[in-house]
Amino acid sequence: MKKTREKQIVKKYKRQKLKQLYLASGVTLLTTLGTVGLSAHADTTGANNAQTEKATSATVATTNANTTSNVQTLRSSSSSAAAQTSSEKAPQQAATTSSASSQATAATTSASVASASATASSETHATSTTTVSSQAVTSTATSQATTATSTASASSSATTNLTVNQASQSFSSANTATASKSAVKSVAAPKVLATTNQAAEPKTDYSYHGEIKNDVSASTGDKAHNATNVAGVANNSNATPSVTNASWTVQNFVNQIGSAAMQVSQEYGVYASLMMAQAGLESGWGQSTLATNAHNLFGVKYNGTGEYVLMPTLEYYGGAYHRVNAKFQKYNSYYDSLVRYAQLINRNYPNSTKRAGSYQAAAQNLRYGVYSTYATDPTYASKLISVINTYSFYRFDQPVSQEKYENGHWYLYKNGQKQTGFQHINNGNKVVYYNNAGQMQYGQQNINGHWYYFDEGTGAMQAGVKYIASQAKNVYYNNQGQMQYGEQNINGSWYLFDQWTGAMKYGWQKLGNRTVYYDNNGKMAHGQANVKGHWYYFDDIDGHELTSQFKRIANQNKTVYYNDQGQMLYGPQVINGKTYYFDYGTGKLRADVFYYNSATKGTQYYNEQGQVVYGQANIHGHWYLFDKTTGNMKTGFQYIPEQHKTVYYNGAGQMQYGQKLINNHWYLFDKITGAMKVGFQYIPEQKKMVYYDKNGHMLYGWQKLNGATYYFDTVTGEMAKGQKNINGHWYNFADGKMSTGFTYLKDQNKTVYYDKNGHMLYGWQKLNGATYYFDTVTGEMAKGQKHLGKYWYNFDANGKMSIGFTDIKDQRKTVYYDKDGRMLYGNQTIAGKKYYFNPFTGALKK
């Protein structure tokens, strides 16, 4: 009934699996090339290899047609039971037969061993892939039977790979555990926090005063731990059994993995015999390309960490096979490959560990995994058991050594003999050391010129960082347990150990021509680091201290400067003769910024290169002037000698243009050059002429300029032109100059007279010995005959009053004007002579 139930389960599973495979888009057939399975009883020959390749090709060709072939059950490492179609590893068995001796045990064994299959792990795949990697290896006598069997029941492994998330979940714990025990753990160090307002010191103390006495081993990320066989110590505590009745290929393979299989068996509680049988079948007894090039015994695909190798494979898509290169996990040793296998068994097939009670039961239980069966081939377990029995692999499951405590000392006996030297103890997974008397050693020991440390309680050889309390020092033992000296890289971080004592170094250290720094955990500083209140920068590659140079800190969007002591600078600094300014809080180079320098007692400007600017500078469209010595910004009136001009800078230091009221005075500055204007200046927007004195001040009112008198409006400063009544007096300004004396006013067609003060004169005026008369209203100078009051007067063409005999040509008469200019009439005695003038017209009677 049980077997019938098993067949029903297998049949149901195959139907589900095949449905998934053929309905899924992009089904891919992946055949690992170069994987060669070898017969356990026949030497490998060229013919066999050729036959193998033919069998492989036949298998690939018949995969789609032969859907009832032995579909390998997927070993899922997903935490979800629904992920039964996912697998980490799918071993595949190629069906073979013998021609006539199927009843004989030897023949059965040959057929079992010959069913070695290359594998492909879905450890990191995110797509569905069908993997076919069948190794059909036969002897000459059974080749026809094998070919027929391959056609009828080809061993094709259908593998639906894990999704990315499932793969990540599957190996998260395995990767954390021990994919390779030689890996060094990362070193944790305190996080460096930025500080502000740090005052620069003139000198850095590079000396380190004394060693740190505390145990930092727990802070390095690689604290002391037991060293194991992977460290290079021979597994002398267990004699490795030998195999008989086996080909050279099998014997050689067993010699290579036997010791490691026994160790993994003890460490992970799995059967060494079962592990060796599966490894042999799946790697062609170590002859597959993956095994020889990458120590990959189970065809595990690359999981994204560690190293990998590229292997040519065939993938089926687009209706055809394509040759591509796929990534497969590369291990440092067979031990690492077996560890990964053991982790898988413990996780997904716990009933196939030693809890099964026997390797036979463990093999049978491979069909009952947590999520799926290991292989759907119902004879898979019997094949494994047959291989184990044929080669007596069960002997690898039996320890042959014994520890004894005698007279206060631990001894190790092997076959009744005390053992000495380094020994691996499976119980406790540790490497210990027995002296020449066979006694286990503890603490520090110098062995063959190397210092080792063995746990004071267990005697386990230690690897990693160890604090030696009696010597108050931290030292480092590599994976071989040997104390290390000088520079050491521990999981990506550099440390320094004394060349003589091995003591971990701290603080400032000189390494050749470079200065480096190790923090309180001994870790070499890289990037920014705060040491005793000062920020330093250590090269990202070799850790050397940066000195006397600018450094761009990209993630903080700033440029800083480290002086010749390596300290970050702040505030104004003179570097190579140029002054720079660095933010007092962050050390950021201040570029394109104005800054008040208390030392120079002035505002300075730092350009885009962070340098202080001197002299004239155009900044964002404004002209500024900075002292040529201090760099202090100038304000107010400044004379620019090289341009022979006076300019004005406002309180912000910006040059001014046009009319500006400064300290209650109006000034005018050239609109292009900013030069201060003096003298007469025309203001076009106000249509006025003004005058600026030698100080640039606009003038108002009466002004004596260059010997001439001008008048400027007392409010606007506009220069007066033409006639202007000022304080009750009429003035005349020709081209701005005040008129004096006789002036012809063309627009009024009259001649007037302005006295020395520019006042227009009226009425009778005695000017330059002559008498003139100016209209009492208009000021117009009288010309010709003029009746004023009771008398007639006559004024010549120049306005001079006439006296004496005067011819009035337009009236054809001669008249006489007395000394006061009055016309005389009637009888008159003039100069002793008598004359008569018409009493009405004044005409002289001749």
Image (cartoon, rainbow, N blue to C red):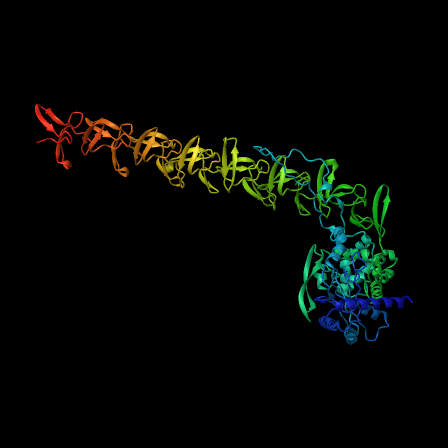
Q: Quadrant of the C terminus?
A: top left
Residue positioned most to the front? 840
Front-lying residue, 206 or 797: 797
Percent x, y of residue 461: 76, 45
Q: Residue at x 90, y 66 (%)?
A: 2
* Residue 342, placed above or below residue 50: above
Front-lying residue, 823 or 580: 823
Percent x, y of residue 28: 71, 67
For residue 520, say whether it is visible. Answer: yes
Residue positioned most to the right? 1
* Residue 331, placed above or below residue 50: above
Q: Left or right: 114 with respect to 749?
A: right
Front-lying residue, 795 or 201: 795
Percent x, y of residue 135: 75, 68
* Residue 812, placed above or below residue 244: above
Q: Left or right: 702 with respect to 247?
A: left
Q: Left or right: 301 with respect to 739?
A: right
Q: Quadrant of the N terminus?
A: bottom right
Percent x, y of residue 845: 9, 31
Corner quadrant of residue 673: top left
Front-lying residue, 145 or 776: 776
